[in-house]
Amino acid sequence: MDTLCLPVNEESLKMAATLLKEGQVVAFPTETVYGLGAHALNAEAVNKIFAAKDRPGDNPLIVHVAQKEQLQGICRVTETAERLMDAFWPGPLTMLLMKDRQVPDETTAGLPSVGVRCPNHPMALALLRACGLPIAAPSANRSGRPSPTSAAHVYEDMQGRIPLILDGGACQVGVESTVVDLTGEIPCVLRPGAVTAEMIASVAGDCTVADSVMRPLKEGEAAPSPGMKHRHYAPKAKMTVYVGADEQVIPVLCQKYDETENAWILGHEKCLPAFGDRNCMSLGDTPKETAQLLFQRLREMDEKGAKLILAQGWEESGVALAVMNRMARAAAFDIVRL
């Protein structure tokens, strides 16, 4: 299969909409990461997503819509969900709600709930309106790889696997949407993102964070949200994340680097001069900047042939929780707290 990578315009949107209506898979930009989309209510089309990604079938997908009115027949919208939609949609918030009759088990990995969101990206919304369909879309990378924040990343993983990539430039947020479970009495964040638990609580009255956010799932434990069960976001190199004050972390990173052949440091921008002539790249100076850079840097580590990645993390609060969730999974939860 030849894979086209086209800038987003009226012609490419029309082509993408036609492919989606025909049951094909198309990659497209969102504000978080690039998505790999197919008609959410077409089981055969959804299965093509899993095939293109080599994604395990027990990993549920998120359904994207252009407006909340499209949710009729997809899920049962609660009063809390309505308030959160009014506050955060379009935006990087996915809500888990009880699914309705139209949604095939393939889309939800057989779960009774379905994740839904309205993306805050003009090109994603234009595609959703052009095809008029709800679109199931995980990140547009091979399963386990760092998520794609540019069309080039998608092409690297999906060349020959899908017919079309819509190139909308770099993604603004850089990590996937927050997933909040609204099927219980109190909203619970299963996957942190740019919309924090504190922001959700300010609208919903309360919000908890699942303890599984910063630990691997136990054997046999179900994954109600994407990004929980399987290996995710991982570079080819072994990775360790170090959390602590700069004056504690910097000497440890230097020591570990000096003990290892072909190591790289991913550090906070202000700390880079302290690493001297060691191989290092910036993760920015704020959690928001790290979110925008993380997946790009992990892919660059693969290009450099790194054998060990020594990464400087953040204390888990606000957006930093989303960053550390991704870094922890990329590092197989090898986190050193100093």
Image (spheres, rainbow, N blue to C red):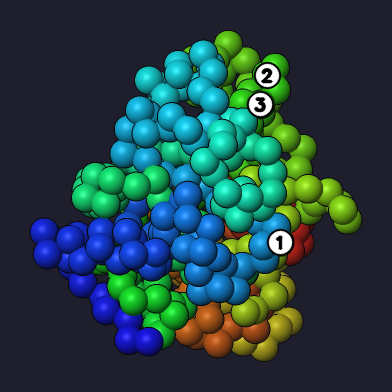
Give the left or right position of residue 156, taking residue 109 as reference: left
Which residue occupies 62% across, 26% down?
182
Label 3 – label 2 distance at C-alpha:
8 Å
Confirm whether residue 81 shows in the render. Answer: yes
Which residue occupies 44% across, 80% down?
161
SS state under label 2? loop
Which-is-in-front pick, marks 1 and 3? 3
SS state under label 1? loop
Q: How many marks?
A: 3
- The residue labelled by disc 2 is 186
Crowd rating for badge 2 (residues with CA inside 10 Å; few <14, some 14–19, many 20+): some
- What mark, if any, has residue 183 been given in the picture? 3
Q: Amino acid at mark 3?
A: Thr
**Image location of residue 28, percent across then percent down:** 33, 60
Label 2 – label 1 distance at C-alpha:
26 Å
Which callout, 1 or 3, points at the residue further toward the start of the chain? 3
- The residue labelled by disc 1 is 230
Confirm whether residue 277 shows in the render. Answer: no
Q: Is residue 292 above or below residue 101?
A: below
Q: Amino acid at mark 2?
A: Ile
**Image location of residue 110, percent across then percent down:** 69, 49
**Quarter the N terminus occupies:** bottom left
Which residue occupies 17% across, 61% down?
14
Which residue occupies 49% across, 36% down?
74
Give the quarter of the image for residue 54: bottom right
Q: Out of 293 and 3, give the one closest to the viewer.
A: 3
Q: Amino acid at mark 1?
A: His
Crowd rating for badge 3 (residues with CA inside 10 Å; few <14, some 14–19, many 20+): some
Which callout, 2 or 1, points at the residue further toward the start of the chain? 2
Q: Are marks 3 and 2 in contact (CB under 8 Å)?
A: no
Q: Are marks 2 and 1 in contact (CB under 8 Å)?
A: no
